[in-house]
Amino acid sequence: MSREVRVPALPESVADATVLAWHKQPGDPVREGENLVDLETDKVVLEVPAPSDGVLGAIQAGEGDIVQASAVLALIEEGARSATAVPVRATPDPVKVPAKAPPPAPQPVAPRAPVAAQAEPLVAPAARRLVKEMNLDPQQIPGSGRDGRIHKADVVAYLDEREQAPPARDPEVHEQAVPAAPSLSGEAGRPEQRVPMTRLRARIAERLVQAQQAAAMLTTFNEVNLKAVMALRTQYKDLFEQRHGARLGFMSFFVKAAIEALQRFPAINASVDGTDILYHGYYDIGIAVSSPRGLVVPILRNCDQLSMADIEQGIADFGQKAKDGSLSYEELTGGTFSITNGGVFGSLVSTPIINPPQSAILGLHKIQERPIVENGQIVAAPMMYLALTYDHRIVDGREAVQFLVTIKEALEEPARLLLRV
């Protein structure tokens, strides 16, 4: 009996998906729930599990094909497992069993599973695609993820290290005959590589251009002295982690300060809908996270109702999911306001781009000791530049400036966040 493997339901905003990588080939035995194929959409990589036990039959959509929701990807022959699995894998054994020692009944299976196969590393979907494109051996790539999982960043680091390593000397090759860099082509000394954009990267590019063309974007700046926040964090971070099981970072302070400011200036939490302004009575904050596939902005829902521990744990979970490529559609859709922190990469100042249809985005930057005047004295203080890019169609400059001043005051006197003054 044949069982169809179909593309899962896609959200309304996603028209189709691209077949990224098959993990099974026709004739391979499969088990119910086992991941058969990865599908890449504009936002996430979907894993398609086997609907039942059996043997994978004909594949209807190859890697690189564009597929619609409910399209048939492959067939599973449910009753053919025992009859098909052994012949498909009955290739010459790499290990031979001595004739003088007859093996027990299960022993013939052992030669078909070399030690290397048993230690097959876990590879994230984005990394798996790059490994395949570059024809790499995942066994040689150190994984930085949980349980040694290999991420795209690990593959890139491995390639960088390999390219920087001095090439082995070949006595048959002339000293000046230096091979070209792997996977690159072109003129000698001027290698190039053409790589298609991933769907996520193409979607990011499309949305950024859309934001530039659709909104009247303007950016205003301020700076904040984080001395009080840093002192508070230093004093309570160990107790906070023991009590809540989450690390106390800076983002929870900024999220809480942003909510205070958004409540005072509701236009910054609003969006343009045709000729209307849609005001939101809730605070779903998008937190920009760097992932191996590009920048993603998962949404932390109802932040005004969350504790600082909830916020820190939520952001930590987003970071891990982004690294693993396991963020869901629901976690990436919606949002009334966004925060992006270029400071983690060393950015001192920038002008972030609005995430449509939102009307504003807050940009955080590197904390740097700078001289300031305090009580008539020049002192060094941990300062950060803040940037607010806003849609001037619905947000006035006065509101934008006062919004940043509210955040500045809340962070320079953290008691304001508790007393709401």
Image (cartoon, rainbow, N blue to C red):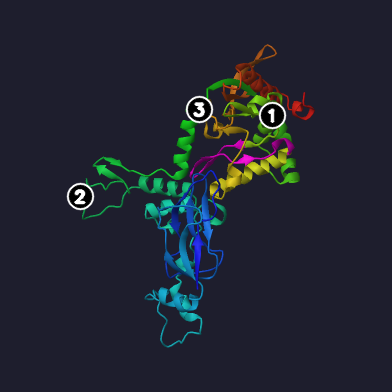
How far separated are the C-alphas under marks 2 and 3? 59 Å
Q: Residues within 10 Å of mark 3 (few under 14, many from 20)?
A: few
Q: Position of residue 411 (x, y in %)?
A: 69, 26
Furthest residue to the right?
419
Per the rendering, the mark at residue 174 is: 2
- In the rendered image, is residue 23 in sight? no
Q: Please state, as top left, top right, bottom left or bottom right, where the C terminus lies in the image.
A: top right
**Which residue: 50% across, 27% down?**
214
292 inside magenta stretch = yes
Quarter of image, res 132: bottom left
Q: Is residue 243 magenta?
A: no
Q: Which amino acid lies under the numbered mark 2 shown in the image of this protein?
A: His
List x then y, in percent, for residue 66. Answer: 42, 51
What x and y, as percent, mark residue 93? 39, 76
> Does residue 166 lie above or below 70 as drawn?
above
Amino acid type, residue under disc 1 in the picture: Ala
Label located before the other in sequence (2 or 3): 2
Crowd tier of the residue under label 1, counting other residues whose Cα lies within 10 Å: few below 14, some 14–19, many 20 or above:
many
Which residue is label 3 attached to?
214
Q: CA distance from mark 1 to mark 3?
A: 28 Å
Toward which corner of the image does residue 31 lie, by quadrant? bottom right
Q: Nearer the viewer, residue 357 or 70?
A: 70
* Mark number, residue 257: 1
